[in-house]
Amino acid sequence: MVNLQDPRVLRTRQLIREAFRELLRNEEFEAITIKDIAKKATINRGTFYAHYEDKYALLDEITEQFFYKRVPGQVMNAREFTAEICDQLILLAYHYIVDFYQICRMDSKSIAALVDEKIKKLLQQIIEGILSKGQNFDRHQIQIISAMIGSTIYSAAHQWLNVEDNTRTDLLINLVRPYVMKGLEQYDSCGKYTNGSPAAP
């Protein structure tokens, strides 16, 4: 078990991540081997496996680190899911997709799907954290609502890449925010539908 506080360990992991990102700029994920990564990082294969189980674990870590570096402090510290927080999450998702796909060649649909699912999960976790602070929903309701909101935001942001004028993120926000916020407003402070119908247990 490596000591993640050891500066040498941190340096080695950084070398591995940088080597992997460099390889992803020029090669398809499936074509990249552990030997390729180790050679690029100037380490041996044994050292790689001391830090990562495989290249999928490495991809997972890079995806997560790349994501959290872009999360605004206002979002991380939010105690309520407001329209402004919703806007920031929409922009975060869209710019993340653009930046990540430019840095890494995502020619493989299977790998793109892995990355997409990871980002949806990270969005869901952030939204869960906010809802657990500001709304009186139970744990199951928070999980379901967060999954729906995260999937909606990510799917819309991803689809926006195909829009002709996709730099107009203001238009993306104006489409997605009302949909998300109106759905959330269907619940009252007790976690029930505002029309009186009980929420699912």
Image (cartoon, grey):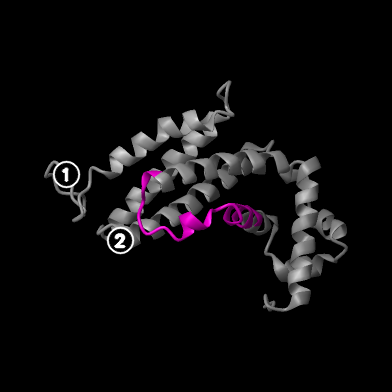
Q: As displayed, is residue 87 above or below residue 71?
A: above
Q: Which residue sits at x=26%, y=60%?
A: 138
* Corner quadrant of residue 10: bottom right
Crowd band around label 1 with a 10 angstrom C-alpha radius: few (<14), some (14–19), many (20+): some
> Residue 118 or 166: which is nearer the viewer?
166
Residue 5 % position (x, y): 68, 78
Residue 160 % position (x, y): 53, 30
Q: Which residue sits at x=48%, y=56%?
A: 74
Residue 77 % position (x, y): 45, 61
Q: Which residue sits at x=54%, y=45%?
A: 92
Q: Callout 1: helix, strand or loop?
A: loop
Q: Which residue sits at x=74%, y=66%?
A: 13
- Which residue is denoted by mark 1 in the rendering? 194
Q: How many marks?
A: 2
Q: Is residue 13 left or right of residue 112?
A: right
Q: Of all residues shown, which one is farthest toward the left? A: 196
Asked whether 82 falls inside the magenta stretch, the response is yes
Q: Residue flagged by tag 2: what amino acid is it?
A: Arg
Q: Is residue 197 left or right of residue 169?
A: left
* Corner quadrant of residue 14: bottom right
Q: Is residue 32 left or right of residue 5?
A: right
Q: Is residue 108 left or right of residue 28?
A: left
Q: Nearer the viewer, mark 1 or mark 2?
A: 1
Tell me, for residue 139, which label it has, or none. 2
Q: Which residues are magenta?
A: 62-83
Q: Residue flagged by tag 1: what amino acid is it?
A: Thr
Q: Callout 2: helix, strand or loop?
A: helix
Q: Of all residues shown, which one is farthest toward the top? A: 164
